[in-house]
Image (tube, grey):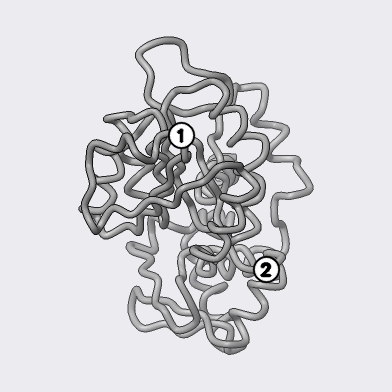
Amino acid sequence: MLHLVSAYIRERNDCGEEVILSADDLDTIVNSPNIPVTIEDKSNRLLQHLYRHSEGLGEAVVIQPLSSNYNLTYSPNLQELVYIIEKLRSEQFIIREGMNFQLTEKGWSEAAASAGGQPLKPCSVLIANEGVLCTEWQERLLPNIEQFGYLPRLLTHTTHTKPQNLETYSLELIADSKLIIADLTSQSPEVYFTAGYALGLNIPVVWTVNSSDAELLPVKIKELRPIVWDTVEELLVILQQRIS
């Protein structure tokens, strides 16, 4: 059971989902039809892992040590993982050089087809703790950002009760992001700080601000040129041009 449950948790986390389990959930996971059973299905899980962690075709992904990673394929032991790797290599789905693995063009196409397209890259959206703004971005902006190839998390800083469905700032989440959207409406110091932290990690930052606050920005430098928006619909159009 351990290799199956640990593989499930790892795969869900790898896809950006938070997993909270109780003892009653274990049997459900083990008996789930989504758990791969055949070597073909397990092989596909390895292709998808490489696909999620590759920025593009030809980029190598390090898996080290193999002895601690056999749950990537829901395998019960290292021997099965090695067999799957050699099978995929002989079928020209992957190239292996030591602990470096990369998808071939054939492997990339196979992984993309099974994943339903390009993998969504993690994206953090930083906003002030403003009720109307939070609701508007949650309901109308975030679902559309997924169409641009990103999986967004709406983050807010508050010392009071956290609004429903929002996450508080986490430097770990920021470090894992491939893009930051930082909205300066309401002048939140935490937005400046967290976006600055992302810039220090060479993570791209797109700055935005509602037109009502555009003239009130305390920081005016050429590197910080926020998108000025009036409506969420207008902002979506500009974001699509900027990040797609």
Among numbered discs 2 and 1, the one appearing first in the sequence: 2
Q: Residue 142 carries which label?
A: none
Residue 106: image location, x then y, percent: 62, 86
Which amino acid does the dot numbered 1 rest on?
Ser
Measured from the top left, where is residue 166 in percent x and y? Answer: 52, 27
Q: The N terminus appears in which quarter of the rendering?
A: top right
Q: Which amino acid does label 2 sit on?
A: Gly
Rendered residue at 42%/82% (across/down): 96
Residue 212: numbered disc:
1
Residue 213 versus residue 100: which sits nearer the camera? 213
- In the image, residue 58 above or below residue 17: below
Which corner quadrant of the image does residue 164 belong to? Answer: top right
Quarter of the image for the C terminus: give it: bottom right
Circle 1 packing at 10 Å, graded few (<14), some (14-19), many (20+), is: few
In-front residue for pair 17/179: 179
| Side of 160 relative to 219 (left or right) | right
In terms of secondary structure, where does tag 1 sit? Answer: loop
* Residue 117, disc: 2
Question: In this rendering, is residue 172 above or below 222?
Answer: above
Task: Out of 8 and 59, give the one closest to the viewer.
Answer: 59
**Which type of secondary structure does the marked residue at label 2 adopt?**
loop
Position above or below: 34 against 191: below
> Separation of disc 2 and disc 1 at Cα?
38 Å
Of marks 2 and 1, the one in the foreground: 1
Residue 100 spot, x, y in % from top left: 36, 76
> Measuring 51% from the left and 40% from the top, which residue is drawn there?
153
Residue 7 located left or right of residue 193: right
At x 39% / y 28%, what residue is drawn? 186
Between 73 and 130, the residue placed more toward the observer is: 130
214 to the left or right of 244: left
201 lies above or below 60:
above
Q: Which residue lies furthest to the front in this view?
A: 215
